[in-house]
Amino acid sequence: MFKVLCRCVFWLSLPFWTVAQATSVVFLNPGNSTETFWVSYSHFMQAAARSLDMDLSILYSERDPQKTLEQARELFQSAQKPDYLILVNEQYIAPQILRLSQGSGIKLFIVNSPLTLDQRELIGQSQHIYAEWFASMVGDDEEAGYQMLKELLRKHGPVPEGQTLDLLAFSGLKVTPSAQLREQGLHRALAEHPEVHLRQLVYGEWNRERAYRQAEQLLRRYPQTQLIWSANDEMALGAMEAAREVGRKPGVDLLFSGVNSSPEALRAFIDGQLSVLVAGHFTLGGWAMVVIHDDALGLDARRLGGPNWQLSLFQALTRTQAQQLLEKGDQIGARFDFRGLSGQGKPDSYRYPFGLQLLLR
């Protein structure tokens, strides 16, 4: 009697366990575990995972690409492998991770920093080897760089004929695709505005302290500077601190732009010290979770606009939008229905409506 009862309990529980087992995802976060952007990025992903009933683990590399590779290697060799791995092509490490993944059965999703043209060509020649890589999702970083300078000039106002504006630019890591693309956007905007003179572009490596030290020297070297373009908010804030120390007034006689939406940057934008703030791509990881959820259900990414999405996520914030983001903080995705974005049950014409506007209603 006891044996029969045990078999019944096991038989009844097995289908339930199979149905209830959550899709497991690991995200190799390339940033520091104290870095505002990457922490907020992770929080949004976690909100998506909860909404979608998925199992998400996040591993930080603390800005060390070798640590990212070690984390990936351990995952591929682990007895308890996740179903999906999300990675960033930070410092061009994606191809190495793709090679390590061969035969692992883990499906790979690249976000934020896209593969370079050379990397795409190399991988394209051996696509069958990288069967685990199934999709990518990036924001339009080139457009973000372009938007920033255009908005700075709009805020500055018309330049009288025959006069010029001096510009300083702070880019990120030289070996990061997103930094390179934002620079390309900057140069596209400069080509449309010959009245703007780029005095110097330096690599602040996304770091506030480094940008502060660089700005100290540059503002003394180019005292007529009127515009400062920064590829992220941390560098903008560092340069602003240096500007105040040399007697300049951010938002008055020196206009700053930046990318991201840290609380400090949002406050600086709201009070007018930061003139332009472009944001929205902290949502990429959360949107990727929706795509993975649908892939696990067997939905064809090609029917939904994939498998390689380039999204227009960046937008120049208004003061109202900045205030909304500041008030929501890390809870911005906490009550959002990510499941409602799924392609399941949608018509063939459906495309994911991903964007910051979904969160600011």
Image: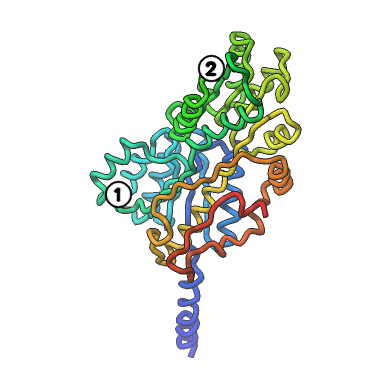
Q: Nearer the viewer, residue 320 or 211?
A: 320
Residue 283: give x, y in percent of width and height. Answer: 56, 48
Q: Is residue 299 above or below residue 13?
A: above
Asked if 111 appears above or below 264 in the picture, the reply is below
Query: Residue 132, how many percent across, how many down?
Result: 34, 53
Q: Is residue 34 visible?
A: no
* Separation (CA) of disc 2 from disc 1: 45 Å
4 or 226, nearer to the observer: 226
Residue placed farthest to the front in the image?
A: 161
Determine crowd level at label 2: few under 14, some 14-19, many 20+ residues with C-alpha closer than 10 A.
some
Q: Which mark is residue 344?
A: none
Q: Secondary structure at mark 1?
A: helix
**Residue 349 vs residue 307, the one in the foreground:** 349
Residue at the location (42% across, 29% down)?
175
Which of the two discs, 2 and 1, labels the residue nearer the N terminus? Answer: 1
Q: Which residue is disc 2 drawn over?
A: 197
Q: Which residue type carries mark 1? A: Tyr
- Check disc 1 and report the residue beneath it: 130
Residue at the spot x=60%, y=37% of the render? 278
Q: Quadrant of the C terminus?
A: bottom right
Quarter location, residue 223 = top right
Instruction: Name the kind of residue labelled 2 in the image.
Output: His
Q: Report whether residue 230 is seen.
A: yes
